[in-house]
Image: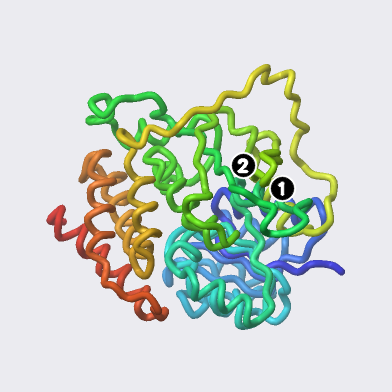
Amino acid sequence: MTKNISLLGSTGSIGTQSLDVCRMHGYGVKCLTAQSNVKIIEQQIREFKPELVCMMNEDAAKELKAKIADTNTRVVAGMQGLIECATYDGADTVLNSVVGMVGLQPTLEAIKAKKTIALANKETLVAGGHLVTNLAKENGVDILPVDSEHSAIFQSLQGCPEKKAVKKIILTASGGPFFGKTASELENVTAADALKHPNWDMGAKITIDSATMMNKGLEFIEAKWLFDMPNEDIEIVVHRESVLHSAIVYQDNSMIAQLGVPDMRIPIQYALTYPERKPSPVKALSLADYGKLTFFEPDYETIRCINVCKEAIELGGLHPAAANGANEESVRLFLDGKIKFSDIAYLNNEAMKNAPEIINFTLADVLSADKAAREFVLETVKC
């Protein structure tokens, strides 16, 4: 069956690489969405001819509508437009690659519309937790991971005979640009320093999350929900080369891992072609070219954001949503030069601890906790 895709976040790094995969395999692209990049999405519209496009920015939507008036593509705007794309009748698969909490609501609506979810938006599961997983079960919807680490675990699990055969899962982390640095060395690093990722080409927010290792903390929470594993059975290992993308350990201590060059088109394609495997636009991995692969324990004392996320998921409820909301705000402030690198972990931790104690939360509760965490950060910094 020919797949028809609704791609949320088409102008970012994951979005553009997703279109590489769609181009190679001839998948239909029915919907595209972006924040405000009119230039890139216009090019995408003219190549892929989607039926519906959403711009989150209303002014950008007006500009785009004028530029593509000669096409048959309809333009909508804002959250309602994003949800319209996520639930579009002509698409069977929704690839959610938007960045941030904005990705939660369209994912929930897409699940209700019984779309297959290819998920690259961490915040959906970090903040939504049981709201998302329970809704997916109720609607018989598959959530297929697109993050390289979770895809690696998902791929490694394909040969698993039964759930109880798995002893633990191992999430690998590149360690970002500040691996091996001391706290004093990190005191005055700039956003420009933090944006120099050694292996991956990502957007600014995700690249800063890699530098703080908050991304690995968020992935820890995401892994718990995706694979229904106890917190103590999820291990994080720093792997500088980003070749072994993650692994599982069986009860007999055999380890199964997925390896490949650091190219997001591998996990993107597997989510779109699953359960099939097809030729890929990615170059083959040569182990001999790398020569050696290295592995280290994370430095939890210096890079403290992982600890924030681990405590958040231990506390449960709305604490992960608060940690995530605070992080989005603190990363924005760091990129704007208003706080120090070391302030990010402090602000995230304090906001996380202030989250209300509600276990059986609703979407309204999640949105409220997210807003409160952002306001806490701004008030603390006095912005």
The x, y position of residue 76, in whole percent, is 53, 77
Q: Position of residue 73 (x, y in %)?
A: 66, 73
Figure quadrant of residue 8: bottom right
> Which residue: 71% across, 45% down?
266
Residue 45 percent location from the top left of the image: 66, 63
Q: Position of residue 110 (x, y in %)?
A: 60, 77
Q: Residues within 10 Å of mark 2 (few under 14, many from 20)?
A: many
Q: Depth check: 348 or 329 in front?
A: 348
Q: Using the image as rendered, state which of residue 6 and residue 372 is in the foreground.
A: 372
Residue most toward the front? Answer: 252
Q: Cβ–Cβ below 8 Å for labels 1 and 2? A: yes
**Residue 343 visible in rendering:** yes
Q: Answer few, some or many: residues within 10 Å of disc 1's Cα (few below 14, many 20 plus, some between 14 and 19).
A: some
The answer to whether one can see residue 38 in this image is no
On screen, residue 366 above or below 382: below
**The quadrant where residue 5 appears:** bottom right
Q: Secondary structure at mark 1?
A: helix
Q: Residue at x 41, y 81 (%)?
A: 362
Q: Give the residue drawn at x 60%, y 59%.
A: 227
Residue hosting label 2:
246
Residue in the image at 23% along x and 30% along y: 188
The numbered disc on residue 54 is none
Q: Amino acid at mark 1?
A: Ser
The quarter of the image holding the N terminus is: bottom right
- What residue did someone put label 1 on? 156
Q: Nearer the viewer, residue 334 or 253?
A: 253
